[in-house]
Image (cartoon, rainbow, N blue to C red):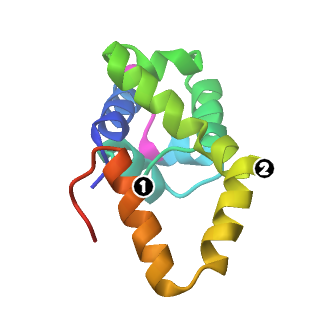
Amino acid sequence: MGNEIDVHLGKRLRRRRRLLGLTQQQLAGACGVRFQQIQKYECGANRISAARLWQLSEALEVPVAYFYDGLSAAEQERAAACESGGEVLASKETLDLIRAYYQLGERPRRRLLDLAKSLNGDSEHG
């Protein structure tokens, strides 16, 4: 099941679709997906990508920001962080770290992971 942001976006999607009198099938056709995908978006089971959110905003004649209305500031920051996650993974520093990590043996990798978790205040290991 999706997190609270996915559920919120789905509720906003359903609200706007219904306000315009569109069926899930009609909206799906406008975005080039099957109606089942719209169902999954609306209940928060599937995450809506940035590109799909743009298509939905165009089809529903609202700005992308419409979907985020009503989220707390903390939730909006988390949503922005999730959307920029691809940029973090594409950075040179991240790629260098991943390469170095996988050049280590299993035991040093495990110790490094435990160290990173402890520095982040994460007490769960595993």
Q: Is residue 104 above or below residue 23?
A: below
Label the magenta part by its dominant secondary structure.
Answer: loop
Q: Is residue 66 above or below residue 8?
A: above
Query: Residue at 43% across / 20% down in the picture?
Result: 68
Which of the numbered marks, if any, corresponds to residue 92? 2
Residue that mark 1 sits on: 116
**Closer-to-camera residue (19/122):** 122
Amino acid marked by disc 1: Ala
**Closer-to-camera residue (10/112):** 112
Residue 110 found in image quarter: bottom left
**Magenta residues, as a range?**
19-24
Tell me, yes or no, if residue 110 can be seen here: yes
Q: Looking at the figure, which quarter contains the C terminus?
A: bottom left
Percent position of residue 8, x then y: 32, 31
Q: Looking at the figure, which quarter contains the N terminus?
A: bottom left
**Closer-to-camera residue (77/48):** 77
Q: Secondary structure under badge 2?
A: helix
Residue 63 found in image quarter: top right
